[in-house]
Amino acid sequence: MAELRTLVTKVRSKNAGPFWLTIDIFCGSPEAYAQVSRDLKTSRVATAFNADSQTVKRFDMPDLNVVKFSLPRPTVQGAIADRDMHGASWAALVGELEI
């Protein structure tokens, strides 16, 4: 097993509006894409975010070698409990997942 970030070119997270986050995993090659697509389960991403797996949307894009997840933000953007206004720090959490 290896951390996701060691297998891919880039993991990026950002806002997808005030209520959603999006995580883009740029695999860099068809081989890396095949491994990530096969081994990274949506339920693992949901667990990492303490989210209900039914609310996590997954988009596999083989032509781009990208796997993308969209999920509800833990807190609304700009709320007093929001510790990441831009949603950028969530990428590190996903990058540390072992697959």
Image (cartoon, rainbow, N blue to C red):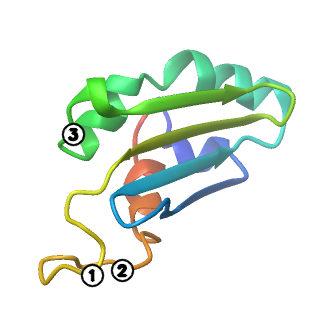
Residue 17 % position (x, y)? 45, 63
Residue 79 % position (x, y)? 18, 79
Secondary structure under tag 1 reads: loop
The relative height of residue 90 versus residue 23 in the rendered view (above or below) is below
List the residue tagged with mark 1.
Answer: 78
Residue 78 % position (x, y)? 27, 81
Q: Residues within 10 Å of mark 1 (few under 14, many from 20)?
A: few
Q: CA distance from mark 3 to mark 2?
A: 19 Å
Q: Is residue 50 left or right of residue 10?
A: left
List the residue tagged with mark 2.
Answer: 85
| Comes first in the chain, label 3 or label 1 | 3
Q: Which mark is residue 51?
A: 3
Q: Amino acid at mark 1?
A: Gly
Identified at 13% across, 84% down, the residue is: 80
The relative height of residue 43 versus residue 80 in the rendered view (above or below) is above
Q: In front: 97, or 43?
A: 43
Mark 3 touching mark 2, by CB under 8 A?
A: no
Which numbered disc, 3 or 1, marks the residue closer to the eye? 1
